[in-house]
Structures are given as C-alpha cells and as structure tokens.
Image (tube, grey):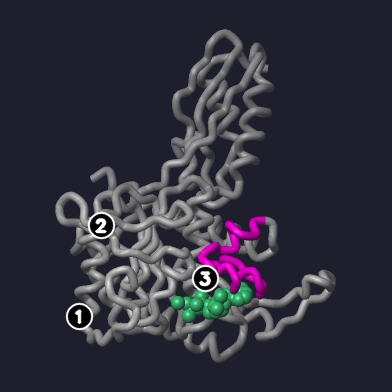
Amino acid sequence: MSQLTEEAVLDQLRNIIDPDLKKDIVTLEFIKDLKIEGGDVSFRIVLTTPACPVKDEFENQAKELVGSIEGVTAVNVTMDAEVPQGRGVANNVALPGVKNIIAVSSGKGGVGKSTVAVNLAVALSQNGASVGLMDADVYGPNVPMMFGVNEQPQVGPGNKLIPLEGHGVKLISMAFLVPPDKPMVLRGPMLHGVVRQFLSDVDWGELDYLIVDMPPGTGDVQLSLAQLVPVQGSVLVTTPQNVSLSDVTRAFKMFEQVAVPVLGVVENMSYFVPPDMPEKRYNIFGEGGGSDFAETHGIPFLGEVPLGMEVREGGDNGTPVVVSHPDSPQAAAFRSVAEAVAQQISIEAMKPELVIMSKA
Ligand SMILES: Nc1ncnc2c1ncn2[C@@H]1O[C@H](COP(=O)(O)OP(=O)(O)O)[C@@H](O)[C@H]1O
Ligand SMILES: [Mg+2]
C-alpha cells in the first residue's frame, strides 16, 4: 500500500486506459484540479466529449483505484468534458467558436439523412454538448418540420442572423428565409453563396458540434462546404440494400477527393421489430449492407437504427424520437450512434500530428 501523495493518486489513475485513444487518462491530461485534504482526494476527469460511452466506467474505476490507497477516506470525482478543437483542411470562413463541423451525407434521398442528423444533434445536446444544426438541403429543407420550428430569424449584432432554437439545438434552414410557396431555383455559384452565408452570416456562438444536414448526392453544396470550412468529418447514412450502397460509395469517394475524413457509416431502417411481436425481426431492406460497406472501406461502423413508426411520427410532428420516446430501441440506437460519432471526432482530433500542430 502506498502513501497518500499526488504522485500515488496519479499512479493509480494511470491504470485507466481510454479504449479509443489507447493511452492512460493521466498521460492524456484528463485529470484536473487534483486536491488532497487530509484523507479527502478530489479531482475532475475531463473527457473529450460529454457523449463518452465509458464515462461511468471511468468514474467507478477512478473511485475504486484511488480509494485503495492507504489513508484515503473519501474520493470526490467530478466528470466533465471539453470537446477538442478539430483540425481543418480548409478555412476560408472563420468560425472561431465552432469546434467541429460534421456533415451528414448520403448517396441518395429518403434514406433517413435528416432523421439521423436531427436525432444526432439532439442526442449530443442531451449529453450536455452545445450543438448547432445547419440545414444545407436547400432543395428540400426538412429541419424546420422535424423541430416544429419555422419563423424568420432575428438579425443581431454585426448584422448576423440569430439561429432559432429547438430541443436545445441552434438551427438555421433555407426554409426560415424563403416563403414555402416560392420555388427554389439555385445554381452552383448561388448555392456556394448560401452555404457561405449559413456559415459566416449566422451567429453560431460557441459550439462543440455543428451538424450539417446535406442534400442527397455529391453536388455543389458538398464541395462548397468542404472548400469553405474545415469539415471534421462526414457521417454516411445508408439503408441496408445494394442500390443504396452503390450511391453511398460515390459519396464516400467524393469526400476522399476533397480530403474530408469519413467518420463512419450509419445503417438506417436496418430491420423492423413489430411492437406486438418483440421476438420477431424482419430485415425489410436486406441485411448487413452498412457494416459490410464499412469493413470494405476500412471505416468505422457507427451503428444501425431499426425502423419504427415513432421515428416517422417524430419527424412529422416536430419532436424527434430521442425526445418523444427516449426509451424506445430507436432512440437508444440514435444515442449510441451519437456516442460513436463523438468518439470518432475525439480520435480524429487527438491524433498525434494535431498535438504537434496545436503546439506550434
Ligand atoms: N428508422 C426509421 N424508421 C421509420 N421511419 C424512418 C426512419 N428513418 C427515417 N424515416 C422516415 O423516412 C422518411 C425519409 O427520411 P429523411 O430523414 O427525410 O431522409 P433523407 O433526409 O435522407 O431524405 C421520413 O418520413 C422519415 O420520418
Ligand atoms: Mg433530408
């Protein structure tokens, strides 16, 4: 049994290894404000995302390990999170308060891209992160309906638009700015202007994550976004069947070309469990396509989301399923996707070359 010193506490905490970053939490500098008063030891563990799946495990391990040191009468652990600033590939529009931009994309429409973007944003915010959602689907903006929010944003200081807010998430959408009966005829250069405006003329403030709901496919909006700001990564959404997967391959290749890291694949509408027959599982759109795709391309599989009426209803009535049915399997699946995305963002941000860059 060792003596109660700061070094002894840190030595014990070195036994806790972050499974993603593959280093111990002392080396990763997660331990802050370590104090020893008599037999009372207190410190904060500052994780790289509030959506950390191993948060509780770290807390319990820390209490147990430090509690085993001779002379310790109490261990006070505060769990905290600071999302690291992501690294960028392009930075033509300055967004100083926004730490990470995540594009939610798919090869084609109707696979649940907006549904994933919305539930991902709300789930991250439920975990305590500050989150914005930019509806970049200028042709079919769905975000207003999915949040039940649609009014004209106010203009604030510096002539910037103040984003609207829904379920704790800051929102901007083309639909807030253009009357619904006015058809949108926008060509390439104009689209670039819209994307630029949504980034630079909106007062996003401080955000851990800015989620971007992309239009389907691989067009001008995708390129504009990648050219204008550092996109930390893209999340690809697909359904299990092959047609959808050949489209997602195109999307994957495009992000590769513009040097945006692909954080992984989400398979949506994976299967259906009839509520009155919970032991049944129907693979309506096929099986395993998303995870096969991830394996083929060497990218993470971020999870599968089952079909569910609550998901569609939530999308139609402005209450995303993670809010309306938090105990449903669909909500659990979205939360787990959110954790996996946050994890990948942390891994990208903590890659060794970044540490060197940020110290330069
Ligand atoms: N897991 C799901 N279960 C049931 N309905 C879903 C699911 N995911 C999406 N939907 C529904 O499918 C439709 C298309 O989804 P949407 O998110 O708008 O797709 P996209 O943005 O890719 O065009 C919407 O009506 C949505 O509510
Ligand atoms: Mg959509």
Q: Is residue 256 visible?
A: no
Pointer 2 residue: 154
Residue 307 lies in magenta, yes or no?
A: yes
Pointer 1 residue: 190
Q: Determine the image quadrant of residue 163.
A: bottom left
Indicate the amino acid at tag 1: Met
Residue 300 point in image, percent of width and height: 54, 67
Write the start and end of the magenta stretch as one range.
300-326
Label whose residue precedes the other's in the sequence (1 or 3): 3
Q: Which image quadrant shows ligand 1? A: bottom right
Residue at 22%, 76% in the rendered image: 192
Disc 1 and disc 3: Cα gap in Å?
26 Å
Disc 1 and disc 2: Cα gap in Å?
23 Å
Q: Is mark 3 within 8 Å of ligand 1?
A: yes
Which element type, helix, strand or loop, lies under badge 1? helix
Label whose residue precedes the other's in the sequence (2 or 3): 3
